[in-house]
Image: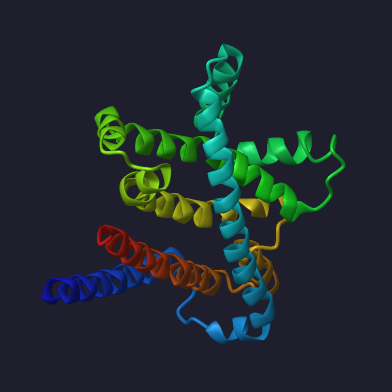
Amino acid sequence: MIKDKQKRILSFITALFIFGLFIALIYFAFPGRKDLDLSQYYSWKNLLLKGWILTIIVSVIVLISSVILGFLLYLLSKSKYLVFKYLADIFTEVVFGSPLVVFILIVFYFVGAPLNINNRIILGIIALSLYMAPYMKNVFEGAMESIDEMQYQAMTVFGFTNYQKYRYIIIPQLLKILIPPLAGNLTVIVKGSSLLNFIGVPELYNAIITVGSTTYAVVEGYIFLFVMYLLITIPLIRLTKYFEKKVAGWN
């Protein structure tokens, strides 16, 4: 308990230090600005709040859809049919070799137009989901391979039912392995959602850019952006650690 409190205090101090360093870097990067007027952003609070909420919603939807696509991609990569296996491997290599912003633009222009999809938010979700699918596939691959074949044989010998196998042996092990990388990928999704600004999705970064171009308060905008992303990622990290402890206590 004491060590956990010490870790939380250390994390808080580290976050304050990084935030102070961030402010100092921005301050010296704009020597002409000797004062910061954060109040300019208050009148745009509704736009910023909508962008912040949209970022969270898009990230959660992308997480769920990319997990499903990643699992399907994993099944294809293990298929006995070589054509499915090769298609899964080729798609994985293409994604790993492509910058996210380029992939988003490709989906926007070469998927949106042919399928007559005009909703930029939907296209952004499709792009992020497809991009994250191979990463999720690797997560499932590592988790599945971590369960030794001997365990399946032992469960059969002891007469475990399918329910007992998955409830008491397989699922607890998979969750212990899956939760940390899935949470890490969600953090990547949250930060990657800022690139949806390139196709006009009104997420958090897009809202900050809009306000900054109107008020010319660019420095204040980056400060708000930094803080509002931390308000998403820090609770996410804490929630992940909580679930890790809960899963570790499963019997």
- Residue 144: where, in percent of width, then height? 37, 35
Residue visible at 56% across and 12% down in the picture: 82
For the view shown, which residue lies furthest in the left direction? 2
For the rendered model, the colour scheme is rainbow
Q: In the depicted view, which residue is nearer to us: 145 or 232? A: 145
Q: In the depicted view, which residue is nearer to us: 26 or 183? A: 183
For the view shown, which residue lies furthest in the right direction? 116
Question: Is residue 47 found left or right of 141 in the rendered image?
Answer: right
Q: In the depicted view, which residue is nearer to us: 33 or 137? A: 137
For the view shown, which residue lies furthest in the top direction? 82
Figure quadrant of the N terminus:
bottom left
Question: Is residue 171 found left or right of 216 in the rendered image?
Answer: left
Q: Quadrant of residue 236?
A: bottom left
From this view, report whether residue 50 is shown above or below residue 150: below
From this view, report whether residue 53 is shown above or below residue 64: below
Q: Quadrant of residue 104?
A: top right
- Residue 77: where, in percent of width, then height? 51, 24
Figure quadrant of the C terminus:
bottom left
Residue visible at 85% across and 34% down in the picture: 114
From this view, report whether residue 73 is shown above or below residue 23: above
- Residue 96: where, in percent of width, then height? 50, 31
Total labels drawn: 0
- Residue 34: where, in percent of width, then height? 45, 79
Question: Is residue 69 found left or right of 201 in the rendered image?
Answer: left
